[in-house]
Amino acid sequence: MITEKKPVLPPMVVAYIEQCQKKEHSESYLISVLQKVQKEMGYLSREAMDEVSTRMQIPSARVTGVATFYHFFCFQPRGRCEIVVCMGTACFVKGAGKVLERFKELLQIKEGQTTPDGAFSIECARCLGACALAPVVVVSGRVYPNVKTGDVRKILEEHGFAAKPKGKASAPAS
Ligand code: FES
């Protein structure tokens, strides 16, 4: 039996796709549509990308290919506490790579991932425009300058992190 997939896209995204479909070369609006999906839903779920594919009549593999090509798209819900580690040149030469590794080690996730409890996620940025403060990390909108690996645990604890016996992250205090 064939079952129809339940629509997941918000009405304003559906309306935008319908507008795009009336234009010439409507497939050229794919990135713009995906940006709207992410803005409205927070990330690109498999179901959302499939619905974009169906509505825009673009093969699913192509939608996925375009989405994964651009670093600004994410495919998991972001954590309640979002960590952005700058990996731009100035930050990188001052040790941002080691700082990133320490965040990953403590939270037991990779960049682009969210802890299983939805508390923390890690993203990398190219340059946050504050190179004089390198290496720079932004946590829930708060800028941390000159971050060293030894600062990482304290930064996380300020946002509610408490390592559990198996090292899993806990939810930040509200
Ligand atoms: S390279 Fe990190 S703020 Fe510019």
Image: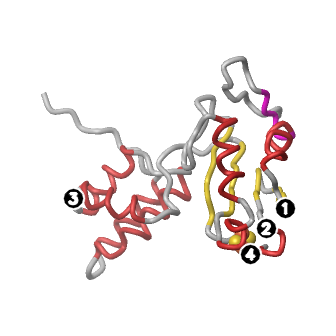
Q: What is the three-letter code of the residue carrying label 1? A: Asn
Q: What is the three-letter code of the residue carrying label 2? A: Ala
Residue under numbered circle 2: 134
**Mark 1 or 3, closer to the camera:** 1
Q: What is the three-letter code of the residue carrying label 4? A: Gly
Q: Which residues are magenta?
A: 158-162
Mark earlier in primary sequence (1, 2): 2
* Image location (x, y in percent) of residue 41: 53, 50
Q: Are marks 2 and 4 in contact (CB under 8 Å)?
A: no
Find residue 146 and name its label. Answer: 1
Residue 172 figure quarter: top right
Q: Are marks 1 and 2 in contact (CB under 8 Å)?
A: yes
Badge 4 element: loop
Query: Is 98 contained in the magenta span?
Result: no
Real-space Cα separation, disc 4 to disc 3, in angstroms:
37 Å
* Image location (x, y in percent) of residue 123: 61, 53
